[in-house]
Image: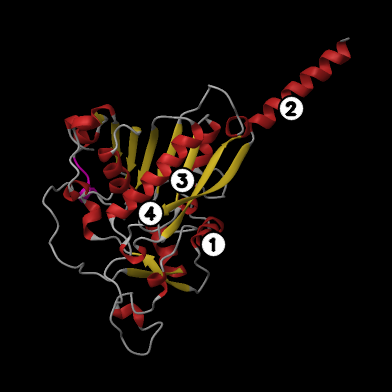
Amino acid sequence: MHRAWLMLFVAAVGLAEDGQRLLRLDHYVPVRSIAPSINGQLAQIYVREVAQAGLALRSGAVRPPVVLFIHGAGTPAEVAFDVPYRDCSWMAYLAKAGYDVFAMDMTGYGRSTRPAPMNDPCNPAQEQQRQFVAAPCASTIERIATIESDWHDIGAVVDRIRAMRGVDKLNLVGWSLGGPRAGGYAAQHPDKVARIALLAPAYSGGRSAPPAGPPNTAPVNTQSRADLDANWDRQTGLPGSIRHGGARRRVGRHAGVRPGGRYVGRRRAPRAERRWQCTGVEPGGGGKDAHARAIHRRRARQAGAAGARPRAARKRRRFGEGSA
């Protein structure tokens, strides 16, 4: 009898441990793109999910809170939020705490559809073109994508997750340029967003519209492995920061940058993306139910303190009382 109870106990422990094992699931969400470079074409938006096996494969009425990560200008979802090095995966950290965690690649990033103009050597700035062509050439397009097309991508992913997981609202986390991406979407769709957290958001704080006319920068950028390493080192100056070369190699590999290599077509952020109020979206009204918190990192070199609002204004608040 005691042996039978022992076997049942061991089996129950094994099932519990298996249910807590983390699963990584890949999803692709089709969307009819409104990005200028592929307007009207069918694009595939890549979404990564990290969750405990017992939650990801569950059925029934019990549903964990859902989080969707929105990346910034420089790195796609896996690189930003699910780095396979030690305990550096933010997605895994939340999944272990019981959240159902998702992250998405915007059009032109990571595993999502890459518009063909991003591979055109004429579309970087002329000083960068010298690496690929003998003589400078004119850009073939003004913009790869816009903040509006990014919101469109987010909307398709949010709707797919809501349908898959049977939830009404998601929580959004945006990093750097993911701030205006997540913040702008939440301001337009408060009925689909419970809370947002913005880490070092690329945010100017201004309400005046950006200058009219074509952008004053090239539509795409280039990035070498040396550029990526320098950007990494510039932001890892605090005690406990990961300066280890193994971590940088993993990040570089997942970002698609090889040692000594360089690739054409990193999306450049349009000017309007740093002011989500300037695009006709005004926080307030129906958005009062969504809570927001903006966090500025002292070592965040890509979204500096000049773009952050005073600490008191960045505390948790309702949209109707002012945007974070």
| Residue type, numbered disc 3 | Ala
User: Do callouts 2 and 4 mark residues in contact (Cβ within 8 Å)?
Assistant: no
| Residue type, numbered disc 4 | Gln
Q: Please provide percent x and percent y for residue 271.
A: 22, 59
Residue 267 counted in the magenta span? no
Q: Which residue is mark 2?
A: 14
Q: Which of the image's four quarters has the C terminus? A: top left
State which tag comes first along the sequence, 1 or 2: 2
Region of the chain picked out in magenta, as a range: 305-309
Q: Which residue is mark 1?
A: 253
Q: Which residue is mark 3?
A: 103
Any part of residue 121 in sight = yes
Q: In this rendering, is residue 264 above or below 192?
A: below
Tell me the number on the disc at residue 235. Answer: 4
Q: Is residue 254 left or right of residue 8?
A: left
Q: Secondary structure at mark 4?
A: loop
Of tags 2 and 4, the one toward the viewer is: 2
| Residue type, numbered disc 1 | Arg
Q: Residue at x 49, y 38 (%)?
A: 101
State which tag comes first along the sequence, 3 or 2: 2
Give the spatial CA distance, label 3 vs label 1.
18 Å
